């Protein structure tokens, strides 16, 4: 039996949960689910100046909206500073790290020298082998790790393969600052070890950190977790992802009307594939996801694909579930609160009934919400510009005729109203569209809507006749 998989998502709370972070979380979550393991959450809030409570809240909220659940309480990295210090001091005791008292001026001099010689700036190891008794009095030192000087450090990456770092490029970096605070590099290692993390899945911008972190693991004699550095997401034009490309917080995607399952499906396919499958449910993603199928090349973010996929997910949802999803999302949509307030029980029932026709015509919940105008509008309707253009004198005359026939109907359904309109079309010689368009404009105030006979049935006799009469008057 192999050990139980423990993954973690470790965001820095310096901004919202952006789309790249959401994908990293998703891959960690899918891998944990796929293997029957667990995903942990660690908030990397050691940078006190840039970390905010609001960002932490936004990250938790974004993960929750996406359904990317974590096990137990989120761990605060900052709260664990004492433990990070303890391990750094332990490394000094083990002779694997040492106190360095180089002054800022000395460090600057080293950088200058390196620059002049065209080398990358590296600490020269001047306190590495010095007797601790030589420490200057009353000065707190920083703790530096004794990095190996010969050979190479190899990162066995599940996505990138074997990545070799010559040790001459890894200097004795600081693990504990002279003010007693751990560096980020060190905190991550101690936390991942203590949290029992078996698999680190994160963006490949952390690949060079992986080499330095490996040095710390080795110094402590700890097992290095398996690592998977996933390629970053680029814009559709191949450039680094920016706001223009979609590097927004996930809450922006909620406000644009994307379903969480569609966004997850889209993100899963950014950098991972399962044969030719494009549309997948969350269950399928869990079943199929494996790190070995993560691509090495950068993925490209494409809004058009996301939108198309969202439309597919919407159409595939059952009517009741999509109705619930829309109603739950309304408050997050632009002007959605106002619309949400209009959905009383009767309007909700109409929405459910109208859903088969509505969901065929929308790719996002925003479009879906817009198309529900006719379900909650109060008489007399305010036709939009296109609908108003349809309702000219000829159209009104047609509506009068239709109204008479409708008034005589005994039963009010899509089928009976359709039969009445067809009869009128035949007797008058008018094309069906010439009758349906004014009807649609009068009933919905729009030029597009679900099938007009379905609209008639959903609105019911009284409301339908009233709306038609309103436009004739
Ligand atoms: N906190 C880092 C970030 O937000 C991730 C560190 C890690 O996964 O090791 O980029």
Image (tube, rainbow, N blue to C red):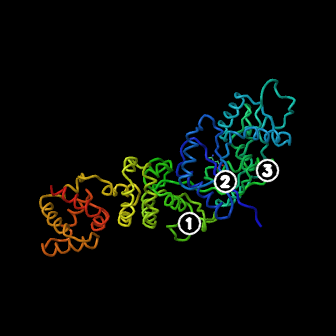
Q: CA distance from mark 2 to mark 1?
A: 26 Å
Q: Secondary structure at mark 3?
A: helix
Q: Is residue 168 left or right of residue 291?
A: right
- Residue at 64% x, 62% y: name it: 33
Q: Is residue 318 left or right of residue 151?
A: left
Residue to which mark 2 is pinned: 71
Residue 265 place in picture, x, y as percent? 52, 62
Q: CA distance from mark 2 to mark 3?
A: 28 Å
Residue 142 place in picture, x, y as percent? 76, 34
Q: Secondary structure at mark 1?
A: loop
Q: Secondary structure at mark 2?
A: loop
Residue to which mark 1 is pinned: 273
Residue to which mark 3 is pinned: 218
Please identify the residue farthest to the top as the structure is shown.
Answer: 138
For residue 368, which quarter of the picture?
A: bottom left
Mark closest to the chain's N terminus, 2 or 3: 2
Q: Is mark 1 within 8 Å of ligand 1?
A: no
Give 203 or 373, whichever is nearer the viewer. Answer: 373
């Amino acid at each position: 039996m192999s050990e139980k998989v423990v993954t973690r998502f470790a965001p820095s709370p310096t901004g919202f949960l952006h789309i790249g972070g959401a994908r990293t979380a998703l891959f960690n979550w899918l891998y944990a689910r796929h293997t029957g393991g667990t995903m942990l959450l660690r908030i990397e809030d050691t940078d006190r100046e840039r970390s905010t409570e609001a960002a932490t809240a936004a990250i938790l909220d974004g993960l929750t909206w996406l359904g990317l659940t974590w096990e137990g309480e989120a761990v605060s990295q900052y709260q664990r500073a004492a433990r990070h210090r303890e391990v750094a001091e332990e490394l000094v005791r083990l002779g694997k790290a040492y106190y360095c008292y180089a002054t800022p001026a000395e460090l600057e001099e080293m950088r200058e020298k390196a620059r002049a010689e065209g080398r990358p700036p590296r600490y020269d190891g001047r306190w590495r082998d010095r007797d601790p008794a030589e420490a200057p009095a009353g000065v707190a030192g920083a703790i530096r790790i004794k990095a190996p000087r010969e050979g190479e450090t190899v990162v066995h990456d599940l996505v990138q393969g074997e990545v070799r770092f010559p040790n001459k490029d890894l200097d004795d970096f600081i693990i504990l600052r002279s003010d007693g605070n751990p560096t980020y590099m060190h905190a991550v290692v101690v936390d991942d070890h203590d949290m029992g993390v078996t698999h680190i899945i994160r963006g490949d911008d952390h690949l060079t950190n992986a080499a330095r972190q490996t040095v710390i693991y080795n110094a402590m004699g700890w097992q290095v977790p398996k690592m998977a550095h996933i390629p970053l997401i680029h814009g559709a034009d191949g450039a680094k992802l920016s706001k223009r490309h979609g590097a927004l917080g996930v809450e922006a995607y909620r406000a644009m009307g994307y379903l969480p399952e569609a966004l997850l499906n889209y993100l899963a396919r950014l950098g991972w594939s399962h044969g030719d499958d494009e549309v997948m449910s969350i269950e399928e993603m869990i079943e199929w996801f494996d790190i070995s199928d993560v691509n090495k090349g950068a993925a490209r973010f494409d809004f058009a694909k996301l939108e198309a996929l969202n439309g597919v997910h919407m159409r595939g949802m059952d009517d009741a579930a999509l109705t619930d999803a829309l109603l739950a999302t309304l408050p997050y949509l632009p002007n959605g609160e106002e619309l949400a307030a209009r959905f009383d029980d009767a309007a909700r029932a109409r929405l459910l009934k109208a859903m088969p026709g509505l969901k065929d015509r929308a790719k996002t919940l925003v479009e879906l919400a817009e198309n529900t105008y006719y379900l909650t509008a109060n008489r007399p309707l305010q036709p939009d510009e296109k609908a108003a253009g349809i309702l000219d004198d000829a159209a009104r005359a047609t509506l009068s005729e239709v109204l008479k026939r409708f008034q005589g109907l005994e039963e009010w359904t899509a089928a009976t109203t359709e039969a009445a309109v067809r009869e009128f079309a035949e007797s008058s010689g008018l094309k069906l569209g010439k009758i349906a368009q004014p009807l649609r404009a009068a009933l919905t105030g729009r030029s597009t809507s679900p099938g007009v006979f379905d609209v008639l049935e959903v609105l019911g006799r009284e409301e339908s006749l009233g709306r038609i009469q309103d436009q004739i008057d």
